[in-house]
Image (spheres, helix red, strand yellow):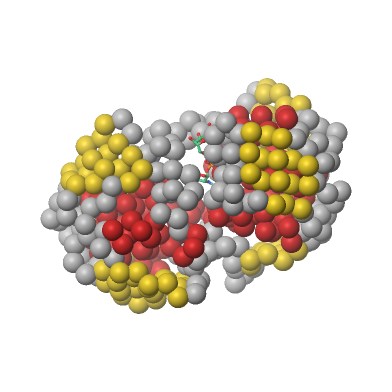
Amino acid sequence: MDKLLITGGRPLAGEVRISGAKNAALPIMCAALLTDQPLALDNVPRLMDVRTMAKLLGLMGVEVGPQADGRLQLQASQIKDPVAGYEMVKTMRASVLVLGPLLARCGRAKVSLPGGCAIGARPVDQHVKGLQAMGAVITVEHGYMNATANRLKGARIVMDLVTVTGTENLLLAAALAEGTTVLENAAREPEVVDLANCLKAMGARIEGAGTDTIRIEGVGSLAGARHRVMPDRIETGTFLSAVVAAGGKVRLVNTAADTLGATLEKLREAGAKIAIAGGAIEVEMAGRPQSVSLTTAPYPGFATDMQAQFMALDCVASGTGQITETIFENRFMHAQELQRLGADISIQDNTAVVKGVERLLGANVMATDLRASASLVVAGLVAQGETLIDRIYHLDRGYEALEHKLSGLGAKIARVR
Ligand code: EPZ
């Protein structure tokens, strides 16, 4: 099994190109289920999760073109089998995003329940409740959600909590429903806006994406379209936090600073100089960062997907930072791996108190989930000596060519067996 070997202690310098966003690409790929015409996508990242989604759609009969230079074409001329089996859903929770579009297009769907995952229980009750409000009949048997509907009907849906994929699933379904759907307490994440933009290019009528109230006027059919997937704001944030931890000067291109929410302010608080020019961000960091305290929250609050990387930053900062995780109940698994590198972290309930130390020392560590892995990479870049990160398949799910991109910035990092 592949591992990453990092020899830390070198500042980062140069330019890095940010890939398309995984968490936008996955729901947008599902939009292909809503039309028999081709959906041509640009800026699609080369990632395991994108391959998994392509495979899942392929199993349903969607024609998936080759992925080259960020391009990927999908065409669901017909859907022969509106099913997402356990084997697929267990490897990628985002598979549940096929439920809404399958119901809207085929009037039926069978999707495995995702079950728990490493970072928390993560139920899908809000997805189900919303589709039921639109007239779907959903039963759960043998671990599967069996859903049927004649034609989904627009409804006013007040979501109990802010859910990103829940909002996306209902947005996808409502695009083809009869009448108007209003989603209240909707997620405001930029990925939701990107999905809405793609659907609009396909002919959907959507207003308010990016606010907490989204209004969708259902249409009878959608057409094909061409859409460019937004840049990955979490990959962007990960590179920025790596530079702030390790020091140096890096220019990030093909990114979008206005999607980063609270991340940029927190990095400035840590002492980074950040300049924004169009689709590029320049970050410069000299000396040791200052610790920062943060609480994760739905967008535009501090992203839970950046929490682990900031914990790595706080580990080497001067001062003490308090990190509170409010979105997922078990998203501190990186803490004990960071401690193996010499970090001083104590956890009480959903708050981690991180006392910055003068230096981390390389060690063998284990990746436990995608962003936890990213935090170990950030820490490994700063730690003295060699850090060997095991189970990096987690990283491959969500970061395109991470070690190549970091090598290009002068890091000593290699994939080893
Ligand atoms: C999305 O997951 C992202 N995944 C996650 O990215 C991200 O961490 C998360 O949003 C929060 O920003 C994709 O976009 C594919 P939620 P999602 O539904 O949609 C609870 C990464 O590292 N909830 O917004 O599954 C849930 O348990 C990942 O790239 C319910 O109770 O997250 C959680 O506590 C991991 N019932 C909270 O809501 C529901 O029906 C927010 O989860 C749905 C969610």
367 relative to 160 in the view: left or right: left
279 relative to 360 in the view: left or right: right
Kindly tell me whether residue 367 is visible in this rendering: no
Query: Does residue 181 lie above or below 257 as drawn?
Result: above
Query: Does residue 143 lie above or below 400 as drawn?
Result: above
Q: Report the residue at 22% width, 60% height from top.
A: 289
Q: Report the residue at 44% width, 48% height from top.
A: 301
Identify the image quadrant of the C terminus: bottom left
Q: Position of residue 337 (x, y in %)?
A: 27, 44
Q: Report the residue at 36% width, 58% height from top.
A: 265
Q: Report the residue at 56% width, 48% height from top.
A: 188
Q: Position of residue 342 (x, y in %)?
A: 17, 48
Residues 248 and 63: in front is 248
383 relative to 172 in the view: left or right: left
Most extreme residue toward the left is 358
Q: Position of residue 200 (x, y in %)?
A: 73, 58
Kindly tell me whether residue 395 is visible in this rendering: yes
Q: Position of residue 413 (x, y in %)?
A: 31, 65
Question: How many numbered dots are placed on residues in this image?
Answer: 0
**Quadrant housing residue 146:** top right
Residues 232 and 158: in front is 158
